[in-house]
Amino acid sequence: MIAEIGHFALVLALALAIVQSIAPLVGARRNDAALMGIAGITAPAQAGFVALSFAALTACYVTSDFSVANVFENSHSTMPLVYKITSVWGNHEGSMLLWVFILSFFGALVAFFARNLPPSFKATVLAVQAWVAVAFYLFILMTSSPFARLAEAPFEGRDLNPILQDFGLAVHPPMLYLGYVGFSISFSFAVAALIEGRINAAWARFVRPWTLVAWMCLTLGIAMGSYWAYYELGWGGWWFWDPVENASLMPWLVGTALLHSAVVMEKREALKIWTVLLAILTFSLSLVGTFLVRSGVLTSVHTFASDPSRGVFILCILIVFIGGALALFAWRAPLLRQGGLFAPVSREGALVLNNLFIVTACATVFVGTLYPLALEAVTGEKISVGAPFFNLTFGPLFIPLLLIVPFGPLLAWKRADLAGVSQRLGGAFVVALLGIGATLALNGQPVLPALGVGLAMFVMAGAVTDIVERTSLLRAPLGTVMQRARGLPRSSWGTALAHFGLGVSLLGIIGETQWGAERIVTLKPAEKVSIRNYDFIFDGSVNRTGANYRETVAKFTVRHNREVIGVVEPSKRTFPSRGSSTTEAALMTRGFSQLYVSLGDQNADGSLAVRIYHKPMVLLIWLGAVVMVLGGGLSLSDRRLRVGAPRSAKSHAKSSASMQPAE
Amino acid sequence: MMLALVLALMMAAAIFAVLWPLSRGRETVPAGAAGASDVAVYRDQLEEIDRDRHAGTIAGPEAKAAQIEVSRRLIAAAQSADTTGTADNVIDNRWRRRITALAALVIMPAGVAVMYLALGSPGLPGQALSGRMEAREQTSLPAMIARVEAHLEKNPEDGRGWEVVAPIYMRLGRYDDAVRADRNVLKYLGETSARLGDLGEALVSQANGIITDEAKTLFEKIVASDSADPRAQFYVGLAAEQDGRFSDAAKTWRALIAQAASDAPWVPAVREPLGRVDRANKQANGAPPSGATSGPNAEDVAAAAEMPAAERDRMVRGMVERLSARLHDDGSDVEGWLRLMRAHVVLGEKDKASAVAADARRAFKGAPDKLRQIDDGAKSFGLGG
């Protein structure tokens, strides 16, 4: 009965979404308050029904109701409760339900919080939101229903893919989806602005926090997925330029650009049309990302073709939403009023430059990800575009971007003095040079990693400089500094923190890729292997039994310069119900660096293949992401209105910078 | 039924979500609402700049420039607020709302019902693991018996039902019930030698292996009508043995073996007691009774057969006491203990039988396989573990 209630609730949500996608729009065009008001009730009602549906599916998982095909295929009665719950979204059907659950939840939030938007605009936004919802409800109900039933419930389920039975994977997809779906709000706002033919003053004020929330979730989601791949897949890598990863990186990149251009728009009413376009692109890439992962197109273009109903449906959704939104943009964007003016050298100018670099970087990822797929679909030829391609294209685009990051926050709005800003960044330059020098002194050649360290130092020092300048730390007495620090908007602290986090991640990436060490050996008990002054003594292995798996645990005593510093226990788990196994790497953290031990196969003579890595500064990669998210959170908590005070023309009389239109 | 009610309530809630906003709210939005909300935003921004200037976050000239910019936007927004806005058609609105209400009341429920009935499986109950566990228990023996018993309670004349349940009772050791069931089978389905044999066997089991008069009569009746029934012949032989007519028993069983196909699986089962009665015959005809086995010998039994009931009872008790005394002197004879237990059971002294069982267990504390024999025996006499 519970499964049927969930199924029915989903159909009702679809019905309400259909109503919401038509009635408010008609109301907005005919200026009918009652029809527009419908969206304000149906949006939360929809969310309620989808929540009920999601709860019903969860209940089916928790009680192991294998008469629901989806539960039978992805659960097992002996699984720990937490994985019974996480397997709700550990599969295609359930994850799509989670997707619409978040979508409808955000829709309800818009209905509640968009009170001081003009009613017709609010109605249009919610109607657009409902179009997206309708497409997804239909997709779920017609092609991937999580509530399909089996007349005779099998006694035991097929179990969740063991590799997914992990806490990281339990949290990773919801975070990603929060990000993807969060961008749907900015998409709805953008499309509504195009339909209405005008962007009202509160537009950016609403779009920015949503974008920020989505961006934070996506950042965390990507970082978590990367960390999960690092410790669960057993290869010690944290980023593979895998299409699945790229699928989440692309919306993140464009979302970052959107975040910055939305700031310009909110503070300066400039870059309006560009921001609208970015909002459309960001959500389009989120859709592409969702479907790249969900359609099976990535495993092979042939699996995509083997399930035509699902594949064609996906293609239709992509074409309608991306094509439709872009066509609407081409048609209606000229109606939008141009924004404010600014000089090329200004905060706005720097943000435009940032946007250009980011969007270009995203385009290279897009090509690198989709070109092999397109080629395989057309000619049947399989090529693999891997790390070398991305390192050669993405890297060179990101280096200048990172170079200008410290400049941005220091530039004044409207028109700025580049020489002055460079001067103020002198300290940061010195720090960067010291970093390069120290790296060369410690590690010697080659020079490139040292330059990388210098760049990371520059980004971090630049972020600190921003705060130092704003609080006049080095010029004013301490009391004044404290007062200014308190008076500084939290969004400024957030900016500095997020930029600092970017430098931290960069430092981690350079450390791990340039100075990592690896040993692959076969060990018998009591044998020893050494890596970077760390000795691993293999003490032997034992077998253990978990809730739904058996594992072979190897024990290593770790010594550093002859002193015992601990014991690591990597293991290999075998899950009989799926007949598959996972590698549980053992990690030992030393400062920001990690020792990584992962097991290979056991040989007949009792010896064990072992991979051991030393990964210097590897934790900084994810720590940087966390710092970025904290920065985003600080900025989000700043609920003040944002007005960017321009540098007035009089105070800048010497500058003969010519004014440029915003777009 | 429950499901239908819940779904109907959900449907009602969905309809309400559409109808409620239709029933309230102003007829139209005031003209120029969009411009008005812009004006509000710019006013807030001006206040914000003021606050920032006082707090010292932005310098005076910059604040002034910002104020000028925002004021310019404010004026533009205020102008558009005055000019925009369309004339409203109230009658038009009323029709639109009626159509929407109709859609919510008719089209939406109909569409939802059609779609759900096409996709869903309202007739399928949920089968949570715990529920399926119960279902599995219900296919277990006690649950099946309970179901059959409930059925027979209502239809006591269903001979087939009794026929199904009788062998299960036998297997479970519920001999009283088995006897009752077999009697009902005979009553409602009629007599066949197989059914009579079943009843006889149940009676023997009920009497702890003693062939009662009734059982004996039954088996003799079967043999009379169908001399080829080996089971009945076996029991007739057993009855003869128990009556002490060893030669009769031997004769019956020998005939049984002679007529059997050489590969009949029950032949060994007959040979074994046959050997026993042959030995007893020899003893009765010559050799004195050995002290080791002090069971009732042929003379005792023959004598007993001629005694009046009370006297026979006394003799049996005497034998039991002899056996008991011997076992308490030397408790290593498993067969002896079992025989003593059975004797007490036959005499209707269940607690004494239990006491014997306890003594036997004490005697065999160190010998697990013998202990198991005692336990099995005690269980088969209905003395519990």
Image (cartoon, coloured by chain):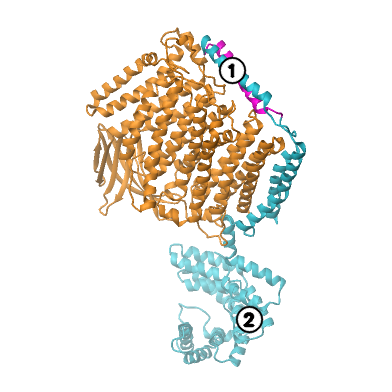
Near-viewer residue (A616 or A349): A349
Disc 2, SS? helix
Q: From the top left corner, tell me how far across and down residue B339 is, in percent.
A: 53, 74
- Which chain did the renderer colour orange? A
At a point 26% along the width and 46% down the height, the residue shown is A525
- Using the numbered discs, state the Cα–Cα distance from disc 1 to disc 2 in whole angstroms: 131 Å
Q: In front of the other: label 1 or label 2?
A: 1
Residue type highlighted by circle 1: Arg
At a point 53% along the width and 36% down the height, the residue shown is A329
Q: Residue placed farthest to the right in the image?
A: B91
Q: Which mark, residue A563?
A: none
Disc 1, SS? helix
- Which chain did the renderer colour cyan? B
Q: Is residue A465 left or right of A155 when viewed as pictured? A: left
Q: From the top left corner, tell me how far across and down residue A570 is, in percent.
A: 35, 43
Q: From the top left corner, tell me how far across and down residue A9 is, in percent.
A: 63, 48
Residue A449 painted magenta: no
Q: Which residue is mark 2?
A: B311
Chain label for disc 1: B
Near-viewer residue (A615 or A377): A377
Please determine whether, in this image, residue A456 is positioned above or below residue B152: above
Q: Which image quadrant: the C terminus of chain B? A: bottom right
Chain label for disc 2: B
Residue range of the region highlighted in magenta in the rendering: B30-57
Instruction: Indicate which disc, 1 or 2, sits on the residue closer to the N terminus.
Output: 1
Q: From the top left corner, tell me how far across and down residue B102 is, in percent.
A: 73, 47
Q: Which residue is mark 1?
A: B72
